[in-house]
Amino acid sequence: MDALSFATQSPLDSVLYSRESPRGIPYAVGLATDNEGRRHTVLAAGEDIDPDHFRLLEGQDLSLRVTENGVRVRPIAEQPPRVQNHLNEMLAREEPPVERRNAPPRATHGEYGTPLPKLAELATTVAQQAAELGLATAMWVHLPSG
């Protein structure tokens, strides 16, 4: 996305997934449409917006900013009042805790029950960095059987 033609607000079309970074910080990735009809991904970092609440903002015009790592959703406190009010209304309606959508199941290794590395997160990180740098990438995984 060209930073010069970047819109500071875009409606959130849908939330694609939410995960946890290797550093243990939750985040969500959504799909938004700019003012010229181009679709782009947006990151909602856990320190700015609770990823469990991000899906409640689908259809809302969110305030965004361009960072060196892509388009990021501004914190809730920096969102327009109508977005903040919408989120408060949605949270008031929702009593049970929100489950993370598309969260991968926790994998274990055999009888010992030790967690396997979060391969989906690793692959996503490698793919994002390769795309930003314009590099081709491939990933192989060897899982020992015993």
Image (tube, rainbow, N blue to C red):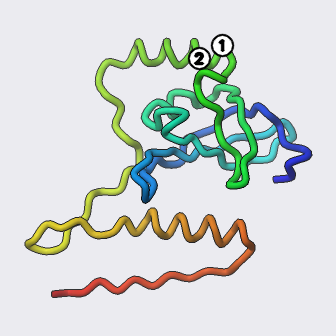
Residue 79, compared with residue 16, is above or below; it is above
Residue located at (25% from left, 64% from top): 107
Q: Which amino acid does label 2 sit on?
A: Gln
Q: Mark 1 points at which residue?
A: 81
Give the residue at mark 2.
84
On screen, 80 above or below 130?
Answer: above
Quadrant position of residue 57 = top right
At 63% across and 67% down in the image, what residue appears? 129
Mark 2 surroundings: few (<14), some (14-19) or many (≥20) residues within 10 A: some
- Point out residue 55 in the picture as x, y percentages from the top left corner: 50, 34
- Rendering coords of residue 52 (x, y %): 43, 35
SS for tag 2? helix
Q: Which of 2 and 40 is in front in this view?
A: 2
Residue 41 percent coordinates (x, y): 66, 49
78 or 93: nearer the viewer: 78
Q: Is residue 134 left or right of residue 13?
A: right
State the residue at coordinates (37%, 19%).
Answer: 94
Q: How many marks?
A: 2
The residue under label 1 is which amino acid type? Answer: Pro
